[in-house]
Structure formats: C-alpha cells, structure tokens
Image (spheres, helix red, strand yellow):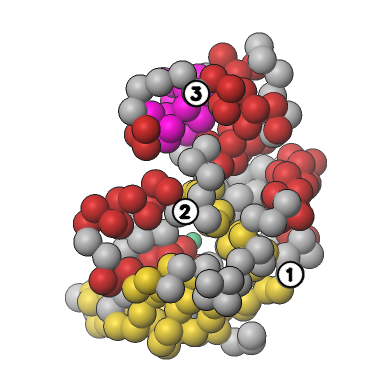
Amino acid sequence: MTDIPVVELQDVTKVYHMPAGDVYALNHVNFSVKKGEFVAITGPSGSGKSTLMNMIGCLDVPTTGTIKINGVSTSEMTDDELTDHRLNTVGFIFQKFNLISLLTAYENVEYPLILKYGKGDYSERVTKLLEMVGFTRDRMWHTPYELSGGQQQRVSIARALATDPTFLLCDEPTGNLDSKMSTQIMEILDNLHKEGRTILMVTHNPETTTYADRTIVIRDGEIVND
Ligand SMILES: Nc1ncnc2c1ncn2[C@@H]1O[C@H](COP(=O)(O)OP(=O)(O)O)[C@@H](O)[C@H]1O
Ligand SMILES: [Mg+2]
C-alpha cells in the first residue's frame, strides 16, 4: 500500500479549444508524489500550473492521460466519488484564501465538518485546528473582513485540515501576502510536512520552494526538469 503514490500523472494533456486555435495548457505531463513528500511546482504565468492543480483536485478533467489519486484513476470515479474525493482526500489552499465572508473564522473551519458529518458539535476539533495556526479563542469569532491576509490564510489552512485529508493542494498560498506573513504561512506548512503531511504547492516565489523536498518546473505545459 505505502508504495502507491498519493498523486500520479501519466501522460496528462489538457487542450482548450479556442477560436484562435488549440491551447495545450498541459502537454504529456508525467510525475508522481509519494506519501509524506512536499513537492513545489513552479513556472511562469500561463505555464499550466493552475490547470494542473485543478485536475489533481478533481475540479477539472484531462483531455487525455490518467490522473491517479491513491492508485485510483479520477476518470473511473463516479460523480459521488469525485465529490467525496474533493471533500475528504484533498485539502485546498488558495491564493485568495476563498473563505466564506459571512461566516466567522470558527464557522469557516467548522463548515467542511458539517458537510461531511452533518450538524453536530465539532468545537473541540475546530478550536484545536485554529489554535494550531495561532488563533486565540477571541479571534476565532472574527469574520474574514476583520482579519489580515496572513490570518485569513491561517484560517484556510485550518479549514483545509478539518476533514483530515490525504494531501494538501496549495495554489500560490503566499501570493497575496507580504514577506513576513509568507514566512509564517510557510512555517506552518513546514511543520505539517514534518508531521508527515503530503503537500503539493504551486508557487511563483523562489524562497518558498526551499521548504519543499523537490521542485518541478513547468513551462508551456511541459515539465522541463524532474
Ligand atoms: N478555461 C480556459 N479556457 C481557455 N484557456 C485556458 C483556460 N484555462 C487556462 N487556459 C490557458 O491555459 C494555459 C495555462 O493556464 P494556467 O493553468 O492558468 O497557467 P498558470 O496557472 O501557470 O498561470 C494558458 O495559456 C491559459 O490561457
Ligand atoms: Mg495560476
């Protein structure tokens, strides 16, 4: 079991058919991520990074090729299995945090637990996760508007961990943060990696790649190292 990669891409191509011609957002991409690895993906704007993340997160499907999550091809998953995968297997962390603005920090972290298990008392888990990312009990009742970017991203990490996913998928997690806040976020991700979490992170910032076990470089939809 342990030898099966958490994420495996086999010859993945994604084509967007545009009026001006076909755009190969990804062109025969192969790589895999093992359990416990922290992998960074970097490359210029438009190189296919978000397309890649969306497909690994099952928000989109490849045109050709196979993506396997824990050994199971996403193209063989039913709609229910894909929904289950998005909720339970992947913890999403986005550049713009994507918190629900009407909900408090606490409620944002509680939300995936309600989706997964139904209504209930999750206060112990929610409080523990928010404390882990440096929140005091008072601050947990603030809404995103009352929080700094760094605080919002810390809430989004707590939210991503709520359902104890198999891996974290981070798309430019420090892209909207100043360098001090970026360092705080990277140190949290670094600790999660040291605890054994599997992390896949897209980044523009060369400083953040130093936290990763290895860095994959992508250009015009193709991996140019590995
Ligand atoms: N929904 C879409 N429709 C058409 N073209 C797209 C779409 N999404 C991405 N692309 C194109 O695919 C390429 C890769 O985009 P993207 O994955 O967003 O790159 P990155 O995240 O590295 O900036 C770009 O040329 C982009 O214009
Ligand atoms: Mg992008």
Dot 1 or dot 3, earlier in sequence = 3
Percent coordinates x, y for residue 93 in the rendering: 53, 47
Query: What is the C-alpha distance between the residues marked 1 and 3?
Result: 34 Å
As helix, strand or loop, the secondary structure at mark 2 comes to strand
Q: Is mark 1 within 8 Å of ligand 1?
A: no
Q: Secondary structure at mark 1?
A: loop
Residue 114, given in percent of the width and then of the height, sits at: 38, 29
Q: Amino acid at mark 2?
A: Val
Residue at (73% x, 44% y) in the render: 188
Image: 208 above or below 173: below
Mark 3: amino acid: Tyr
**Residue occupied by mark 2:** 90
Q: Position of residue 87 (x, y in %)?
A: 39, 46
Quadrant for residue 73, please give it: bottom left
Name the image quarter holding residue 64: bottom left
Going by the image, does 138 lie left or right of 142?
Answer: right
Viewer-side label of 1, 3: 3
In this rendering, would 58 be left or right of 152? left
Residue that badge 3 annotates:
122
Give the x, y percent position of residue 127: 61, 23
Q: Residue at x 76, y 42 (%)?
A: 184
Image vertical order of residue 211 relative to residue 129, above or below: below
Region rendered in magenta? 99-114
At label 1, which amino acid type do we have? Asp
Q: Main secondary structure of the magenta part?
A: helix
Disc 3 is placed on an element classified as: loop
